[in-house]
Image (tube, grey):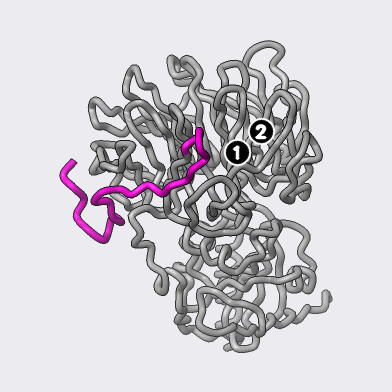
Amino acid sequence: MIPRVRSPELPQNYCWLNTDKPLSLKELRGRVVILDFWTYCCINCLHILPNLKYLEQKYKDSLTVIGIHSAKFDNEKETENVRQAILRYDIEHPVLVDSNFRVWEEYAVRAWPTLIIIDPEGYVIGQISGEGNRNALDELIQKLIQQHQEKGTINFQELSLSLEKQRQPLITPLAFPGKVLATPTGLFIADSGHNRLIISSFDGEILHLIGTGKSGLTDGAFNEAQFFAPQGMAFDAENQILYVADTENHALRRVDLKRQLVETLAGTGEQSRNIRPHGGAGLETVLNSPWDLVKVGNTLFIAMAGPHQIWQMDLENSIIKTYAGTGAEACVDGSLTESAFAQPSGISTDGNELYIADSEVSSIRVVGIVEPYQVRTVCGDGGLFGFGDVDGQGEDVRLQHCLGVEYVQDFLWVADTYNHKIKLVSPSTGNCQTVLGDGSAGLQNGQGKKTQFFEPSGLSAMNSYLYISDTNNHAIRRVDLNTLEVTTLEFIGLCAPDVCIPPNL
């Protein structure tokens, strides 16, 4: 008989979020407990959150989920940054900030995400790593409840929690804006935390609100349509069509400005588990966290963060397929079919090449879209743990989870997200220099390196201005590229969806 292992107790003197007091496994006896070892940069960790929410709601009187945040990046070790991630992803279970991987090591965890299942008597009875295990977990929880009901060792009682979102509601006009796109028509903003899109003039006048603000996958008129944490956008100015990466719906959407209509272009609303290169008809092909878009001719290129690939969609025949990347999470240069990426989250182009912010390897990559169709690394270490904050040349450069990239006149502007900086990279030489931000999280206007940002994740340039989605500041910043003066845009009459009646646009 295999000896049962008593679960190690959780530290009481560490920082806990989403609860007004530390939780102990001893106090939770009588309940099924799932420990979710996660880090908020990790796309796989984000993918299991909906499954955990489903199980938490189904078994709220007998299951407690506790997030154990064991940070990969230095920036993720900061408690305030973890709190912002809890708000952004609407996490409703307690989270322990696992400083120095203490709990991770006590439970012998090896990968993100890992779930540890603890029975109502406090024994570890299972461990699952990776995504897509909702049904297996559901069956296991049901079985445990039944067994311990028969033994009289279960305690049915709903746990009362004090959530971060109750203490800090998202009532700002913008909530965690992911990406921004400057066009002659105006400024397009992915108001990701409010599940909507905003079109404004460059001086802050609201032209259109698109989406109800409630998460969902609904086509229709601007005031009926629904999105779920939309991110990157591309604009066809001639036809007045906006293409949108509807990230948590695992879909691409088409916004027709003339008809004021939203339609689904690709994806089914389900998340794909297939990481091998494949493709098919747009509306029949299951996608996996499309994060950013760029349009070249009649082709949309997509930074598909979930399977670590670059995809393409032919807008004439609506066929969507893998363009580059094997599906392995790595930094491998070479041909399109042998290359590998790691959660690509930003994409830009000069018409001949795609420029990729490859976030999990903290590197800037180039993908050829004309002969010879090669993938190369411009700057960054290329390793999954090769990150930092070092300006310089090529592989000596260190970035930290870069999410945004914008090509402007032979240079790349890069949102070095976890360093709270904007950097300038030469794609030809690999030189990288900090231009904006002092490296600390904050909201400070001014000039050059005297400014502050808080996890900026999207960039777009037009004329002599660069626009930045300053995600954790819930703000759009504007940079005068001639003077490097940074200001914060004010949006006239804009408010959170539940706070006021939207203007009659």
In the drawing, does residue 352 fall left or right of residue 388?
left
Q: Secondary structure at mark 2?
A: strand
In the drawing, does residue 492 fall left or right of residue 149?
left
Q: Three-letter amino acid code at disc 2?
A: Val
The alpha-carbon separation of the residues under discs 2 and 1 comes to 7 Å
Against 389, is 101 above or below?
A: below
Q: How many marks?
A: 2
Residue of label 2: 425
In terms of secondary structure, what is the magenta stretch mainly?
loop
Against 450, is 316 above or below?
A: above
Q: Quadrant of the N terminus?
A: bottom right
Is there a contact, CB below 8 Å, between mark 2 and mark 1?
A: yes
Residue drawn at (48%, 58%), measured in percent from left and top?
A: 88
Q: Check if residue 60 falls in the magenta segment.
A: no
Residue drawn at (52%, 40%), measured in percent from left and top?
A: 484
Residue 8 occupies quadrant: bottom right
Instruction: Work out which residue is located at the far front of the displayed protein and give it.
Output: 483
Instruction: Give the mark nearest the N terminus, 2 or 1.
Output: 1
Residue 144 occupies quadrant: bottom right
Q: What mark, if any, has residue 397 been given in the picture?
A: none
Q: Check if residue 491 falls in the magenta segment.
A: yes
Residue drawn at (46%, 79%), measured in percent from left and top?
A: 161
Residue of label 1: 414
Residue drawn at (72%, 43%), measured in percent from left and top?
A: 361
- Magenta region: which residues? 480-505
The location of residue 173, given as percent across then percent down, is 33, 55
The location of residue 470, given as percent across then percent down, is 48, 49
Against 144, is 361 above or below?
A: above
Residue 379 occupies quadrant: top right
Q: Can residue 210 be seen here?
A: yes
